Image (cartoon, coloured by chain):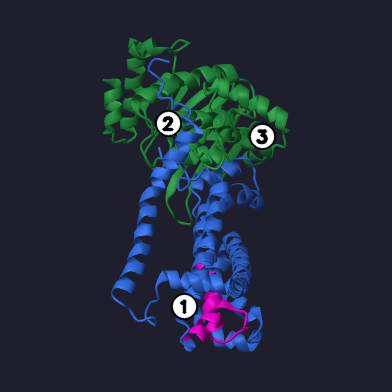
């Protein structure tokens, strides 16, 4: 799957907060190829969100090299090579749905007509046509997150960074948005790095799952997900799906994860 | 989609008649209290034969106002201009200083303790001094009092609004390679608007108090505060009350004007959303 030039390349990344402070990440080497869907999974506080922020140049590694789209992470951010989606949709209340999606386009200096056309296209992609003049607080949590995804994709970034985007949603909505995200990923042909603490979600979505250890976060293992595509509701019921979920869970446990999170138990029961 | 979408339907828009009817229902209790209050005032004062220096009947006050309406209105406008000038200067300065403190945090942490301490000073006590500084008859001396009183709530609230933006909202802007100025323009200032407006509403009241009480320490013959003080001094209680009434109406109108601007600029905010 991985193309000759990786979209993300991390070499020897280490992150320590403050001098002599908490060591969050150590010895991270990872490459993400074009068109991949890579999930980072690990116990809370293992630094997976920090790793995502390092890729996005929202925080700097203490040591190590970060290459995004063939350039430094900083240059990639300045060139707007990635879109980001947080756990919280981070929609601006004073902007309508359409204007929230158009925000990065405004900042790129697109004219009004071009922005409107793209917003319409994006609303169609996330199935929210008709909601352009609504304000974020008039939407449900799942719809807000779809707006957030539309905004992140609006300017066609090479890379989409997602930090537990569905973590705050109920299980039903989460599964539906998982399906939608896969459809969008295939349609938009982008590369996704996805942080989650749900094993089922990681296995269902990804081409590869990166399992991290407890703090300081290291990569314990990378599990290629060989489930067929397109993935459907039935995928979650295949024996192979359960095998992969079990494999990831055991790797997490070996890495010191306390897997008491009830949602995971339910999701996989 | 496997499950029913939890879509929120577009908000229903009622007809004009419905909306007027709903409005009337909302306002009816307040209107009833208003009418009862006036009736009670008039009835008690006349029925119990209350001394005029304590509280004259409302009808007499209104009559006095009407007979000398030119004097009252011009005095009201004179003092209102003092209040408005002070409000504009104080609020603009408060906003500007808050922007600077939010932009350069070390400056903020160096100055904030003093700003908070200064906020506790009863500024009205300086009125006799500003009279000396800016001229007892000049509206400038009252404007300065009003401005200083308005400055602190606007500055402190604005600063709180500018600095209470969720970190992810700032990170999102940074992911778009936005500079500080752009983050202020697109996120911090809109986020601070509700804080700013609640401070501005408080500031309208404070500005009126500052201007009128500033007048009490001496000022132009045309000023409302002077009119109140002089009327009370010569036992012209209806005049004093009529002037107070003018001050009340102007104060409420000033507050209402800012509240209206708030509604118009911030229809998106939780405080101004229509009831469901």
| Quarter of the image with the N terminus of chain B in it | top left
Q: Residue B51's image quarter? A: bottom left
Label disc, if present, on residue A140 of the rendered structure: 2
Q: Nearer the viewer, mark 3 or mark 2?
A: 2
In the image, which residues are magenta?
B203-232
Q: Nearer the viewer, mark 1 or mark 2?
A: 1
Badge 2 marks a residue whose secondary structure is loop
Question: N-terminal of the two: label 3 or label 2?
Answer: 3
Q: How packed is label 3: few (under 14 Cα within 10 Å), some, or many (20 or more)? A: many
Q: How packed is label 1: few (under 14 Cα within 10 Å), some, or many (20 or more)? A: many
- The residue marked by circle 2 belongs to what chain? A
Residue marked by disc 3: A105
Badge 1 marks a residue whose secondary structure is helix
Q: Residue shown at 38%/58% (left/top)? A: B35
- Magenta stretch, main secondary structure class: helix
In space, the residues marked 1 and 2 are separated at their CA atoms by: 58 Å
- Is residue A231 in view from this perspective? yes
In space, the residues marked 3 and 2 are separated at their CA atoms by: 24 Å
Q: Residue shown at 58%/63% (left/top)? A: B98
- The residue marked by circle 1 belongs to what chain? B
Rendered location of residue B168, percent (x, y):
50, 44
Q: Residue shown at 51%/84% (left/top)? A: B231
Residue marked by disc 1: B238
Are the numbered discs 1 and 2 placed on the same chain, yes or no?
no
| Quarter of the image with the C terminus of chain B in it | top left
In space, the residues marked 3 and 1 are separated at their CA atoms by: 64 Å
Give yes or no for contact between labels 3 and 1 (Cβ–Cβ under 8 Å).
no
Q: Identify the colour of chain A in the image.
A: green
Instruction: Specify the chain shown as blue.
Output: B
Q: Residue B60's image quarter? A: bottom left
Q: Residue B21's image quarter? A: top left
Rendered location of residue B37, percent (x, y):
35, 62
């Amino acid at each position: 799957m991985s193309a000759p030039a990786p979209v993300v390349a991390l070499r020897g990344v280490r992150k320590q907060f403050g001098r002599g402070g908490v060591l969050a990440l150590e010895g991270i080497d990872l490459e993400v190829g074009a068109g991949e869907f890579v999930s980072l999974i690990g116990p809370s506080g293992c630094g997976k969100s920090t790793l995502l922020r390092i890729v996005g140049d929202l925080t700097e590694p203490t040591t190590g090299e970060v290459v995004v789209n063939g350039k430094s992470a900083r240059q990639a951010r300045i060139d707007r090579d990635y879109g980001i989606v947080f756990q919280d949709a981070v929609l601006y209340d004073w902007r309508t749905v359409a204007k929230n999606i158009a925000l990065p386009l405004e900042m790129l200096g697109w004219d009004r007509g071009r922005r409107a056309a793209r917003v319409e296209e994006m609303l169609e992609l996330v199935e929210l046509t008709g909601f352009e003049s609504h304000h974020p607080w008039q939407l449900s949590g799942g719809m807000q997150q779809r707006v957030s995804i539309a905004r992140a994709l609006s300017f066609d970034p090479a890379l989409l960074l997602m930090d537990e985007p569905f973590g705050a949603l109920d299980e039903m909505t989460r599964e539906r948005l998982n399906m939608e995200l896969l459809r969008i990923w295939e349609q938009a042909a982008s590369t996704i790095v996805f942080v989650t603490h749900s094993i089922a979600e990681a296995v269902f979505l990804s081409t590869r799952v990166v399992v991290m250890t407890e703090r300081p976060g290291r990569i314990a293992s990378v599990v290629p997900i060989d489930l067929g595509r397109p993935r459907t509701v039935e995928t979650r019921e295949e024996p192979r799906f359960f095998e992969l979920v079990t494999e990831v869970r055991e790797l997490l446990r070996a890495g010191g994860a306390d897997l008491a999170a009830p949602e995971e138990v339910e999701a996989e029961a | 989609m496997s499950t029913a979408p939890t879509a929120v339907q577009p908000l229903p828009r009622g007809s004009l008649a419905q909306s007027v009817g709903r409005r009337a229902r909302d306002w009816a209790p307040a209107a009833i209290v208003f009418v009862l209050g006036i009736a009670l005032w008039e009835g008690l004062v006349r029925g119990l034969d209350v001394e005029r220096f304590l509280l004259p009947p409302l009808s007499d006050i209104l009559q006095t106002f009407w007979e000398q309406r030119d004097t009252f209105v011009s005095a009201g406008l004179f003092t209102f201009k003092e209040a408005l000038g002070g409000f504009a200067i104080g609020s603009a300065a408060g906003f500007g200083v808050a922007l600077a403190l939010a932009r350069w945090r070390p400056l903020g942490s160096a100055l904030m303790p003093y700003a908070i301490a200064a906020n506790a000073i009863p500024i009205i006590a300086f009125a006799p001094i500003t009279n000396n500084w800016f001229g007892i008859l000049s509206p400038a001396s009252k404007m300065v009092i009003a401005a200083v009183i308005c400055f602190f709530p606007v500055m402190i609230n604005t600063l709180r609004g500018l600095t209470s933006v969720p970190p992810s909202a700032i990170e999102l802007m940074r992911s778009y390679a936005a500079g500080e100025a752009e983050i202020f323009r697109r996120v911090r200032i809109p986020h601070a608007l509700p804080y700013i407006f609640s401070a501005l509403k408080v500031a309208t009241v404070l500005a009126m108090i500052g201007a009128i009480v500033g007048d009490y320490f001496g000022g132009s013959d045309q000023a409302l505060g002077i009119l109140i003080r002089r009327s009370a001094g010569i036992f012209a209680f209806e005049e004093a009350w009529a002037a107070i009434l003018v001050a009340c109406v102007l104060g409420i109108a000033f507050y209402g004007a800012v509240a209206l601007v708030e509604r118009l600029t911030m229809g998106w905010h939780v405080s101004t959303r229509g009831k469901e």
